[in-house]
Image: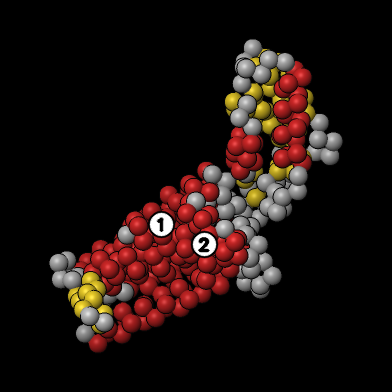
Amino acid sequence: MIVGTVIGARIGHVVFYEPFKYLNNPIDILKIWEGGLSSHGCAVGILIALYFYVYKIEIKGKKWQIIKHHRQGHSWLQIVDRMAIVVALGSIFIRFGNFMNSEIIGTPTGSNCGVVFVGTKIQEIKNRIPAVKMISIIDQDANLNTNHPKLTLEIQLYERISSLKQATNILMKNVKPLLLKKQKIPTLISTEDGRMNIIKTSQGYKGYFKMNGIVRHPSQLYEAAVCLLTFLILMFVWNKKKDQTPHGLIWGLFLLFIFGSRIVQEVIKENNVAFGNDFVLNQGQLLSIPFVLLGFLLIRRAYLKSTSD
């Protein structure tokens, strides 16, 4: 299931979100550490992995035979039902991890209620300049009644940077362009003059850059809350009848809640890639529709089966 999760999530991102990028550089498909995983592909990968767990395929001559694997004594749909419960639980931590990494950020709230995501920008600076020891937000404007609060970014260089000239050259040449450049999804808005104050301290040289933040929806936490609610509902349904729960009911509820909410929540999320930007519904919403329909069918199937029994 772990293998199916990783492979499915990666292939899903490649096929659904950035196919042209990876067609030009196929070797980049293996670079999972650079990011790019799809929850829709993950769901498909899990289903396929569990299918091969329950059944086995034998090849005899030119014929493919699918043979039931009775070791566990459960059907594929029963296994999927049980896994849906823990997948909902695991998804809570995944979305919280996205929040801590400033990934899958929400759209601007247009008010002072929300979160300013700075993690992506900080990591970008660290990756570009080996001389950076630590980056942090040290203060902000006391007046937070704005959707663009004023922030001060503190950049501390390693002690080996021995002169003000060297520190100034590093920060102005490497950091300033990153802070001022236009981004597809800007997490921070720099001030117009872009001036940086550089001082010498006992810990080495430090640069201070004034900028404005963008207050956004913490969309990752919204999704984590939906996953938590889904987990509790699935546990409640399972505890009522345990093994007597109609097959497919829990999986159907999972699809309905998780991907149904995804269609709604995509409205307040920034698109991570440009693919599908011109569609009425974005790629995440379009991919969620078949899962929601499948959820309805599974719930209906479970209801009809329970009433007939």
User: The residue under label 2 is which amino acid type?
Assistant: His
Please give the name of the residue rendered at 32% of the width and 59% of the height, measured from the top-left corner: 1
Q: Kindly identify the amino acid type of the residue bearing the numbered disc 1.
A: Val
Residue at disc 2, secondary structure: helix
Q: Residue furthest bottom?
A: 308
Which image quadrant is residue 229 in? bottom left
Please, which residue is most extreme toward the top here? 202
Q: Is residue 239 placed above or below 137 in the rendered structure?
A: below
Residue lying at 17% horizontally and 66% vertically, measured from the top left: 72
Q: How many marks?
A: 2
Mark 1, residue position: 6
Residue 19 or residue 282, whichever sits in front: 19
Q: Residues within 10 Å of mark 2 (few under 14, many from 20)?
A: many
Residue 269 location, quadrant: bottom right
Name above or below for residue 189 compared with residue 153.
below
Direction from residue 71 to residue 262 in the image, left or right: right
Q: Is residue 237 left or right of residue 179?
A: left
In the depicted structure, whether residue 220 falls above or below residue 51: above
Location of mark 2 (residue): 13
- Helix, strand or loop at label 1? It is helix
Query: Compared to 208, does 81 lie above or below?
Result: below
Q: Position of residue 3 (x, y in %)?
A: 35, 57
Residue 82 is situated, as x and y percent measured from the top left of the image, at 28, 64
Q: Along the horizontal axis of the image, is 233 left or right of 166?
A: left
Q: Find the residue positioned furthest to the right.
A: 193
Image coordinates of residue 196 in percent, x first then y, are 78, 28
Can you see residue 112? no
- Looking at marks 1 and 2 on the same chain, the residue that comes earlier in the sequence is marked by 1
Identified at 37% across, 73% down, the residue is 252
